[in-house]
Amino acid sequence: MVSKDIELDKILVKIQNELSAGLLYTHIRINNNTNKTLEVASFLYALIELLNEKGLLTIEELDERKKQVAERLVKKFIESGTGLMYQDPEYDKYSFESEACVECQDRLDICRAVCCKFPFALSGQDVEEGIIQWEFGRPYLIAHDTDGYCVHLDRETYKCTVYDHRTVPCRGFDCQGNEKWKVWLDYDKKLVNPELMEKIDQENNKIYAISELR
């Protein structure tokens, strides 16, 4: 009984530390971003007022250009992997009709469930349901352990421990012909793509790159 209590305490401490780290990151970012936003907004409004007063710019022209620039910035924001990340488009995972048909059981000893190392965002449904874990420091990416695998993967059987509640990307991923995540060099011969891990590392570096807090 005592050993179970100690183990539970360790788990609670780990959760508390992870939550604290995530909240600290969030609060620092919010504070820094708010200060920067106020500073930039002050300069921007002052510039707009001056240009408008001198007859060099009309509000109508500004509104039209603002829409064009906003579209470019949103695209760049998404491509950079920063900010909150949700699945887009989003589907109801329990009525998802495009589930992949792959002979996973016959291939796990070879591929070792490498697809469970892929980084991807959860859906609003996943987050609200509260079963699938996500990274506190990088919301709302699916949580991975120190070995790179999804925290919900059983390391001995390579099976999902939350299979009935798995995400849409897990349900829909087809390793036979996916060009972005090419698992197999030769699917029929069961030859794993030797460059896949490098691809995963590159994607993780892109997503998890956090600029220095100033």
Image (spheres, rainbow, N blue to C red):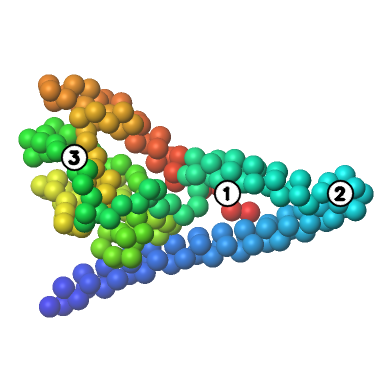
**154 in relation to 30, above or below:** above
To which residue does mark 3 refer?
A: 100
Between the C-alphas of marks 1 and 3, the distance is 40 Å
Q: Amino acid at mark 1?
A: Glu
Q: What residue is at 39 percent from the left and 48 percent from the top?
A: 88
Badge 2 amino acid:
Leu
The residue under label 2 is: 51
Could you tell me if residue 126 is visible in this image? yes
Residue at far bottom of view: 1
- Label annotation for residue 72: none
Q: Secondary structure at mark 2?
A: helix
Please tell me in which quadrant of the rendered image residue 103 appears. top left
Mark number, residue 212? 1
Q: Residue at x 59, y 40 (%)?
A: 72
Tag 3: amino acid:
Ala
| Sequence-wise first label, 1 or 2 | 2
Residue at left 49%, top 40%? 79
Circles 1 and 3, Cβ within 8 Å, touching? The answer is no
